[in-house]
Amino acid sequence: MKKLVLSFVMGSAVFLAACGGDSDSSGSSAEEMDPAELYMGKCSSCHGGNLEGSSAPDISSVGASKSYDEILDVILEGQGMMPGGMLEGERAEEVAKWLSEKK
């Protein structure tokens, strides 16, 4: 029984670590609003460093099939296995704009 609980706790910790963290979400400096940096901090662990996909879909040309509004909705609400709320507010909007330009 202890091994089962320990396995669950360790698995949860690994999953949450992969989701990334946000130590301070109150600021909005130019560095914090760089969509490529925001992507790398929150999305690249699943979508890959070059948007190529790893455990999540390839989004290197997502702008060719989805509009800004559709991309923003996925970022805010989630889709499939992707949880919503990984980015919020202006940060989500900046990344959605950046991704919508990927054709």
Image (cartoon, rainbow, N blue to C red):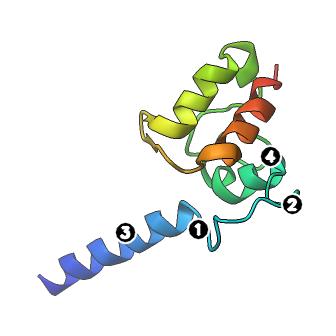
- Of labels 2 and 3, earlier in sequence is 3
Q: Which mark, by number, is residue 31?
A: 2
Cα gap from disc 4 to disc 3, whole angstroms: 28 Å
> Closer to the camera, 72 or 16?
72
Is 67 displayed left or right of 30 in the figure? Answer: left
- Decide: few, some or many residues near mark 1? Use Cα within 10 Å; few <14, some 14-19, many ≥20: few
Q: Which residue is mark 4?
A: 35
Q: Which mark, by number, is residue 12?
A: 3
Q: Nearer the viewer, mark 4 or mark 3?
A: 4
Q: Amino acid at mark 1?
A: Gly
Q: Amino acid at mark 2?
A: Glu
- Decide: few, some or many residues near mark 4? Use Cα within 10 Å; few <14, some 14-19, many ≥20: many
Q: Which mark, by number, is residue 21?
A: 1
Cα gap from disc 1 to disc 3, whole angstroms: 14 Å
- What residue do we see at 74% from left, 53% from top? 38
Location of residue 31 by image quarter: bottom right
Q: Quadrant of the N terminus?
A: bottom left
- Of labels 1 and 2, earlier in sequence is 1
